[in-house]
Amino acid sequence: MIDKLITFLKERDLGACEQGVITLKRAPQPLSEMPEVRKRIEAFMPAEGWISYTDAVEVIKTDSKIQADKYVIAAELAKGAHSLHVRQSGRGWTATELTRESGEGVVVIDTFIAREDKVPGARMRYETCWQERESPVQGGAKAFQSVASRFAGFVKEVE
């Protein structure tokens, strides 16, 4: 069934896709203080991605360092098949680490152009995993549902 879906999408030029899954590397980690947020991001480095501070969005390259004097609102970082997403959650933050692996699913790959006023010239790659699951709405019939999505890095320009 997965092969048929990939063929269907490719024949209709509906975007890049590959067989695979996106899984949680570990349970989402609650973080309550800004030093914990910085430490969690630094532990994932070197990576590429973006960090949203209260006053700006910063593009992170593999040799970048997190700014110690800034307040992090959110971040998405990628290192190969691994991603770290940090989001404000209640009075703290949640850090979620995701991994792209082989498996019984379809990973659809999308490219987005970032807002010029936020991240000038950036083309961001995201991957969304779709897996066949029983649909409670369809009386138990199987349907493909999105189960996970991750920031997968910046699209490299071909020169």
Image: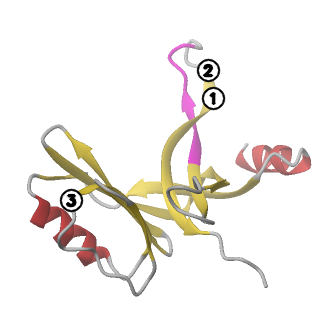
Main SS of the magenta segment? Answer: strand
CB under 8 Å between discs 1 and 2: yes
> Disc 2 to disc 3, how far (Cα)?
46 Å
Q: Who's the residue at 13% across and 60% down the image?
A: 34
Q: Which residue is mark 1?
A: 143
Of callouts 1 and 3, which one flags the residue occurring earlier in the amino acid sequence?
A: 3
* Element type at mark 2: loop
At label 1, counting other C-alpha atoms closer than 10 Å, the crowd grade (few under 14, some 14-19, many 20 or more) is some
Q: Is residue 87 left or right of residue 101?
A: left
* Element type at mark 1: strand
Res 82 quadrant in image: bottom left
Q: Which residue is mark 3?
A: 71
**Percent from the top left, x then y, of residue 93?**
20, 49
Q: Is residue 57 left or right of residue 136?
A: left
> Disc 1 to disc 2, how far (Cα)?
7 Å
**Percent from the top left, x then y, of residue 145?**
57, 34
Residue 136 in magenta stretch: yes
Q: Who's the residue at 59% across and 14% down the image?
A: 138
Q: Which residue is mark 2?
A: 141
Taking 61 as reference, is 7 above or below it? above
Please name whichever residue, 5 or 90, is drawn nearer the observer in this view of the structure. 90
Q: Who's the residue at 71% across and 47% down the image?
A: 2
**Percent from the top left, x then y, of residue 119?**
52, 62
